[in-house]
Image (cartoon, rainbow, N blue to C red):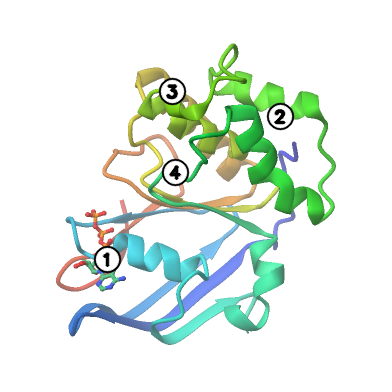
């Protein structure tokens, strides 16, 4: 899969973003920019609005004020192009539990294949092997552990050619080996000139471009 991205392929900006839930301001006056090579970690206590912000940035929720821009264009005016350049993994494994890992992966990858991505069956099996699901490819997911189910969803990251990853608590339920695999994948994505926005209570280390955006009573952005 592509291991380098065009240097100008990621340009996501938020300007003066304001979001309220149940009459509570989660964040306001929020500005951020994500470019190639960036790793942005959204941090903050439970309920601070990390998932909410991530879903806004993924273009999955329009309940906000302010501007979200993809290459300086309103994100929802160019959503098809944006969606072809980002992959969003929500905080649930988001797999069909009655299906097997290989069936799930075929289903998860079908939008990308419909958009022109050429994938062979071997690529799918290889992606499952990469997340240590070799031997479980044909086991219904409802017979897999929580961590193995999480790995089925994560296996997409080995295949999707999108430069921008948006990941909500992707380390949940992973064992030590799974955590290492995902850390390494994130580092490779950033090193290849992609970008990653992540919510995680996990301490990400060793990536020079790491920035943290702390949500809470008020939002402030700074390098860690
Ligand atoms: N669809 C919704 N309708 C109303 N309120 C919502 C909705 N989704 C989230 N909220 C509220 O918005 C706030 C922020 O939720 P969010 O899930 O974004 O927090 P979070 O920072 O991701 O928390 P956690 O660390 O627990 O995952 C919470 O108080 C939650 O109750």
Which residue is denoted by mark 2 in the rendering? 124
User: Which of pointers 4 and 3 lies earlier in the amino acid sequence?
Assistant: 3
Residue positioned 80% across, 54% down in the render: 114
| Residue lying furthest front | 98
Judging from the image, what secondary structure is the residue with disc 2 in?
helix
Residue visible at 85% across and 42% down in the picture = 118
Sort mark 3 into few (<14), some (14-19) or many (20+) by Cα contacts within 10 Å. some
Assign a secondary structure to mark 1. loop
Locate residue 131: give its quadrant. Answer: top right
Judging depth in this view, the residue of 101 and 23 nearest the camera is 101
Relative to 115, residue 62 above or below = below
Pointer 3: what residue?
A: 144
- Labelled pair 4, 3 in contact (Cβ < 8 Å): no
| The label number, if any, that marks residue 49 in the structure image | 1
Instruction: For label 2, count other residues whose C-alpha is less than 10 Å away and answer few (under 14), some (14-19) or many (20+).
Output: many
Closest to the camera, between mark 4 and mark 1, is 1
- Residue appearing at x 32%, y 46% in the figure: 200
User: Is residue 193 left or right of 52 when viewed as pictured?
Assistant: right
| Residue 74 seen by the camera | no
Frontmost residue, 138 versus 7: 138
Q: Which residue is mark 4?
A: 208
Q: Which mark is first along the chain, 3 or 1?
A: 1
Query: Which image quadrant for residue 179?
Result: top left
In the rendered image, residue 168, in percent from the top left (x then y), is placed at 40, 50
Q: Which quadrant of the frame does ligand 1 lie within?
A: bottom left
- Alpha-carbon distance for marks 2 and 4? 32 Å
Element carrying mark 3 = loop
Note whether 25 is above or below 33 in the view shown.
Answer: below
């Amino acid at each position: 899969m592509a291991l380098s991205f065009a240097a100008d392929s990621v340009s996501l900006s938020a300007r003066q973003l304001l979001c309220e839930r149940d009459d509570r301001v989660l964040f306001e006056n929020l500005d951020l920019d994500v470019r190639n090579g960036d790793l942005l970690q959204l941090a903050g206590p439970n309920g601070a609005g990390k998932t909410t912000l991530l879903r806004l940035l993924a273009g999955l929720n329009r309940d906000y004020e302010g501007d979200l821009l993809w290459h300086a264009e309103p994100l929802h005016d160019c959503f098809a192009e944006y969606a072809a350049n980002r992959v969003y993994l929500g905080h649930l494994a988001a797999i069909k539990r009655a299906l097997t890992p290989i069936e799930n992966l075929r289903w998860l990858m079908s939008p990308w294949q419909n958009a022109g991505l050429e994938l062979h069956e071997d690529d799918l099996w290889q992606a499952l092997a990469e997340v240590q699901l070799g031997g479980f490819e044909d086991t219904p997911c409802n017979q897999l552990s929580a961590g193995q189910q999480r790995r089925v969803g994560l296996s997409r990251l080995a295949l999707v050619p999108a430069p921008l990853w948006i990941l909500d608590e992707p380390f949940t339920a992973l064992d030590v080996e799974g955590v290492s695999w995902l850390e390494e994948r994130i580092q490779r994505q950033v090193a290849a000139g992609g970008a990653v926005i992540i919510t995680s209570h996990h301490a990400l280390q060793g990536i020079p471009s790491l920035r943290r955006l702390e949500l809470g009573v008020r939002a402030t952005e700074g390098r860690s």
